[in-house]
Every structure is written in structure tokens, then in C-alpha cells.
Amino acid sequence: MTDYELASLFVEHRNAWLFSIELLYTILGLFLAASAFAATRLSRGLMTIVLVTYVILYQSAAFTTSGDAENFFGVVHAIKEKAKAPGSPLEWHTALDLPDTLLAMAPTLGIAVNMILFICSLYFFYLCRRGHFKWVS
């Protein structure tokens, strides 16, 4: 793979990862808004449909985000390996600024953050359903 292709692949995988993060947080935001404004008004059957739909959408978006992150960090590793060669034209690339400890921790940290957000959003729905927030009319 040429240096140009590797640099281009870096941009493509970064954009795909950022898009999947945006998708994940859009799903999360919509669920939180629906929880705040409609949780007390939903029947038990409709609540089940909303929760099952949210779980499926959130988990599929979380798995997509995790896969895109893995691909992105794989490209970063490839760039770092290729830039180690003397006289490499990739010495300027921003991927070299990412510390190796961050690259090792990032997948686990991403999964942990996604799971914490998921559990907290379900708890927020539960609190809204029980009427703990009176600021919503």
C-alpha cells in the first residue's frame, strides 16, 4: 500500500468512525427526549416496543462504532509502523501524535463508555416513567 493510500484510508476510517459516533449519540438523544416527554404517557405495550426498539438500535450502533474504531486504530498502527522507516514520507502524519497507551486503551474505554451511557439512559427512562421529574408537563 502506498503512503497516499494509507493517508487516505486514515481519513476514510476516521470519518466512518465519527459518523457512527454521531449515529449512536443521535439514537441516545432521541431516546432521552422521548423518555422525558412521553414516558409517563406510554401504555405498557407501547413502552415495551419503544424499549426493545431502543435496545436493538443502540446496541447495533454501538457495535458499529466499536468496529469502526477498531478499523481506524488498525490504520493508525499501520501508519506508525510505516513511518518508523528512515526517510518515510509519513513523518508528518498526525497519527504519529497518538500515544500507544491510548491506542491500547481506546477500544475497551469506548465499550465501557457506551455501556455506561446505555445503562444510564435506561435508568433515566425508569425515573421518568415513575414521575420523578416534575419539570415535564
Image (spheres, rainbow, N blue to C red):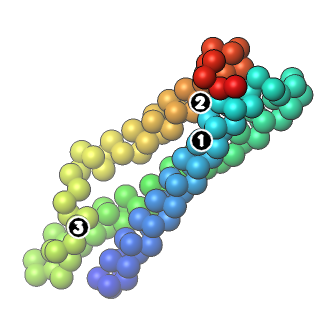
Label 2 is placed on what type of residue?
Answer: Ser
Residue in view at x 58 percent, y 49 percent:
26
Q: Position of residue 64 (x, y in %)?
A: 58, 53
Q: Is residue 54 left or right of residue 49?
A: left
Label 1 is placed on what type of residue?
Answer: Leu
- Tell me the distance, in whole angstroms, between the alpha carbons under discs 3 and 2: 35 Å
Mark 2 and mark 1 in contact? Answer it, CB < 8 Å. Answer: yes
Instruction: Classify mark 2: residues with Cα within 10 Å, few (<14), some (14-19) or many (20+).
Output: some
- The earlier-in-sequence mark between 1 and 3 is 1
Q: Position of residue 4 (x, y in %)?
A: 32, 85
- Tell me the distance, in whole angstroms, between the alpha carbons under discs 1 and 3: 30 Å
Instruction: Classify mark 1: residues with Cα within 10 Å, few (<14), some (14-19) or many (20+).
Output: some
Question: Dot 2 lies on which element?
Answer: helix
Residue 51 visible in the displayed image? yes
Residue in view at x 52 percent, y 61 percent:
19
Q: Is residue 126 above or below residue 52?
A: above
Q: Which residue is mark 1?
A: 28
Residue 67 visible in the displayed image? no
- Tell me the distance, in whole angstroms, between the alpha carbons under discs 2 and 1: 7 Å
Dividing the image into 4 quarters, which one contains the C terminus? top right
Q: Position of residue 27 (x, y in %)?
A: 63, 46
Question: Dot 3 lies on which element?
Answer: helix
Q: Which residue is mark 2?
A: 121
Q: Position of residue 101 (x, y in %)?
A: 24, 45
Point out the frontmost of discs 3 and 2: 2
Of residues 68 and 25, the one drawn nearer to the viewer in this rendering: 25
Label 3 is placed on what type of residue?
Answer: Thr
